[in-house]
Image (tube, rainbow, N blue to C red):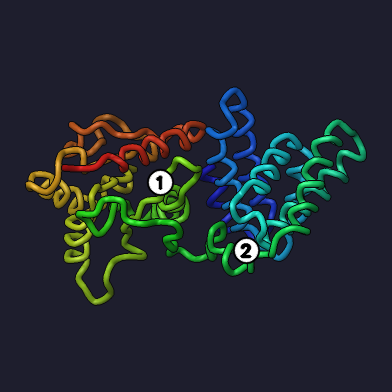
Amino acid sequence: MKRAMHLARKSSKPESLTRIVHFILDLYRAKSSESLTSRNYLLSEMLFWIGQGKAKFPDISRSISDLCKYNADGMLDFITFLLNDKDSNSASNKTLISSCIDALKHWQGKRGGYEDRIKECDDKLKILSSSVTVTPDSERTAQYTVPDIVMPFSIDAKIQHSKFKYDFFVSHSNVNRDWVNNYLLHQLETKLHDNDIAFKGCIADRDFTPGNTIIDNIIDAVKHSCKIIFVITADFITSRWCDFEVDKALIEMLSTKKKEDCIIPILLEKITDQSFPEKLGHITYLDLTDESKRFEEVMKLKRALSIQLD
C-alpha cells in the first residue's frame, strides 16, 4: 500500500487510484467475518482516496467502473456507507453514488447477480435526492479531499488533552515525510467511525513557526505535545535531528508533567535489533512493517493516544 500511495502521488494517470482502492477493498473483503461497523474505517479510507483522485485527475470514471467490475460486493457496501453518511445529501456524494450505481448497472447487465441490491441503493438515492436540500460542495469537499501538496490540513481534529496544545508530535526523517503527512496524519486527525477520536497533531511541515530556529521549534513541539510518536526507519536512525528529538522527548519524560508512556515508537520498516535506537529500546513499539495489518496497528496507536496522562 505504501508503494501504491507513492505512485498515486507521482502518477498522472488515474490507474494509480484504482490500485490503491483495490487494495483497500481487498482488505475490506478479507475482514468479511467482522461486523460492518468494525470495517467502516476502511470505507472511510476508501472515500478519502477517491476524494484525492477527484482532486488530482480530471476524470476518474474509468477507475470507478473498474472497481465496480471486479468488486461489486465491496462497492455496494461502499454505496450503502455513503447513503448512511451524515453528509449524504452533498452534491459530491450524490454524484459519486450515482456514478457507482451506473457502473454497477453496466457490468451487472452483462453478468447479473446484484440486481436487487443495486435497485435498493438506486431507490434510496432517488428518495434522498427528492427529500433533502443539497449541501454545497464546499462544505463537504474538505472532509475527504486533500490538495496535492506536501503540507496536510487538520480536518476534524480537536485537542483531546486539555493540558497540552497538541495531542501528539510526530518525529520522522525527511525521507518519510510524505507517508507521515499524507497517510499517518489523515488517520490520526480524522474520525474514522462513530466511536473513533480525531486527535490534533503537530508536524514540522505544517506547525513549526516560521522564523524560529529548528531547535526552538522542536523544543516547543515536544514540550506542548501530550505524546511523541517516533517513526522508526533506517533514515530515522541516521538523522541527527531525529536523534535530537529523541533526546528532548526523553528529557521531557523525566519531568513531572509527563510519564514514560508519552513516547510511542512505531516501526515503519524492518531493521535489525542492533539498529533499533538504543535510547528507545526499553519502550514497546508498534509494528507497521506488515502492510496487511497496518490499519489495525494504527487503531492501536489511536487507542494509545486516547490514554489521558495524569
**Residue underneath mark 2:** 56
In the picture, the disc for residue 15 is: none
Judge left or right: residue 156 versus residue 113: left
Q: Nearer the viewer, residue 259 or 158?
A: 158
Q: Give the percent coordinates (x, y) of residue 48.
A: 57, 52
**Residue underneath mark 1:** 197
What is the quadrant of the N terminus in the image? top right
Tag 1: amino acid: Ile
Q: Nearer the viewer, residue 190 or 285?
A: 190
Judge left or right: residue 252 versus residue 59: left
Disc 2 from disc 1: Cα separation: 28 Å
Q: How many marks?
A: 2
Tag 2: amino acid: Lys
Q: Nearer the viewer, residue 273 or 21?
A: 21
Q: Residue furthest bottom?
A: 211
Judge left or right: residue 183 versus residue 248: right
Q: Is residue 297 visible?
A: yes
